[in-house]
């Protein structure tokens, strides 16, 4: 395992998360995306260090960095547990520890800025590094494997569906043409080919033209779509009555998925065969925010990454 970098990522919407989840002494809490521990630490402090928090992360470097953060803050080891696992497997992991119900769950779907700042991780299209993008570098395909191995149509669909990239087909075609001559191994090589796929005057004004493709590749490499859906389904089932789930998204496709799921579980089930539309089953959840919570102007100024963050939450009102 790599040595921890002892750099602490700045979490977004911390006050809003604590206000929405309302941690209390004695709560069993789950942070499905530990990172360097900013949200986890805030939840523990809000519960007056009298609950227990289980935090998940695929990146062992993040786990060790968070452990340093907790030790530096004097947090007792008995109030938290760190787990090296995918948040999509939360139900199985908790069941193996004898936990079948929890009180508060947080999902922060943003990648850590630390990943983007380290060229060797391959997340950024603006600095050169190996085409990796894995959170857990001990297993799985890399971004290079996908770029060099997927067929043109699958690449185009990925860029469009997960990156909202309107030039997806042209970019995929150019990638396939170039890799026939030489495989892609470095981020800057791929970014240059993507940027050259569209006229310079049509480049997006505020981001690198390869940004959306790199996002889509990260999502595919780490199985983020399935992990989000599985994680949310499991989280909703794991909540005890009165328990709360909060989700922070940074991308439009993630927010759409969360919004639709929350709308579904917060709605009564109507008998489709009843001409009067009678309620077959009352909703089991209530929405905690009619509109997503977003960062204040002050937070945006201090942490520009917070500008795209959206926080949604629900409370379980019955099993």
Image (cartoon, grey):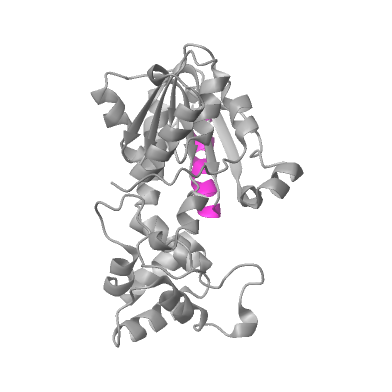
In depth, the one of 215 and 276 nearer the eye is: 215
- Is 26 covered by the magenta stretch? no
Occupied quadrant, residue 86: top left
Above or below: residue 134 compared with residue 75: below
In depth, the one of 246 and 47 nearer the eye is: 47
Above or below: residue 132 compared with residue 294: below
In depth, the one of 73 and 141 nearer the eye is: 73
Residue drawn at (48%, 33%) of the image: 69
Horizontal placement of 183 versus 288: left or right?
A: left
Residue drawn at (49%, 68%) of the image: 125
Residue drawn at (62%, 80%) of the image: 202
Q: Which residues are magenta?
A: 251-266
Instruction: Give residue 20's position: percent from left, percent from top.
Output: 60, 27
The prevailing secondary structure element of the residues shown in magenta is: helix
> Is residue 59 visible from the viewing direction of this image?
no
Instruction: Give residue 306's position: percent from left, percent from top.
Output: 63, 47
């Amino acid at each position: 395992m790599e040595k921890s970098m002892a750099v602490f990522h700045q979490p977004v919407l911390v006050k809003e998360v604590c206000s929405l989840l309302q941690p209390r002494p004695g709560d069993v809490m789950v942070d499905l995306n530990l990172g360097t521990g900013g949200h986890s630490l805030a939840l523990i402090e809000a519960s007056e260090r009298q609950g227990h928090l289980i935090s998940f992360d695929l990146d062992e470097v993040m786990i060790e960095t968070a452990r340093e953060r907790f030790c530096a803050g004097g947090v007792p080891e008995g109030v938290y547990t760190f787990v090296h696992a995918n948040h999509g497997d939360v139900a199985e992991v908790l069941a193996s520890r004898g936990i079948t119900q929890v009180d508060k769950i947080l999902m922060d779907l943003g990648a850590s800025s630390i990943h983007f700042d380290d060229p060797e991780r391959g997340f950024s299209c603006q600095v050169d590094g190996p085409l990796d993008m894995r959170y857990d570098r001990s297993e799985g395909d890399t971004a290079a494997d996908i770029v060099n191995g997927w067929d043109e149509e699958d690449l185009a669909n990925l860029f469009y569906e997960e990156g909202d990239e309107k030039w997806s087909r042209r970019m995929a075609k150019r990638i396939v043409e170039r890799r026939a001559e030489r495989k892609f191994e470095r981020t800057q090589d791929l970014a240059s080919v993507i940027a050259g796929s569209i006229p310079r005057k049509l480049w997006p004004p505020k981001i690198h033209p390869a940004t959306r493709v790199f996002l889509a590749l990260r999502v595919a490499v780490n199985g983020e779509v399935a992990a989000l859906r599985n994680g949310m389904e499991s989280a909703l089932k794991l909540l005890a009555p009165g328990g709360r789930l909060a989700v922070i998204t940074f991308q439009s496709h993630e927010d759409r998925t969360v919004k639709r799921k929350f709308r579904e579980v917060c709605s009564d089930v109507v008998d489709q065969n009843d001409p009067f539309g009678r309620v077959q089953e009352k909703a089991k959840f209530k929405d905690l925010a009619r509109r997503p919570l977003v960062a204040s102007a002050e937070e945006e100024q201090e942490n520009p990454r917070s500008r795209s963050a959206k926080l949604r939450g629900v409370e379980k009102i019955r099993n």
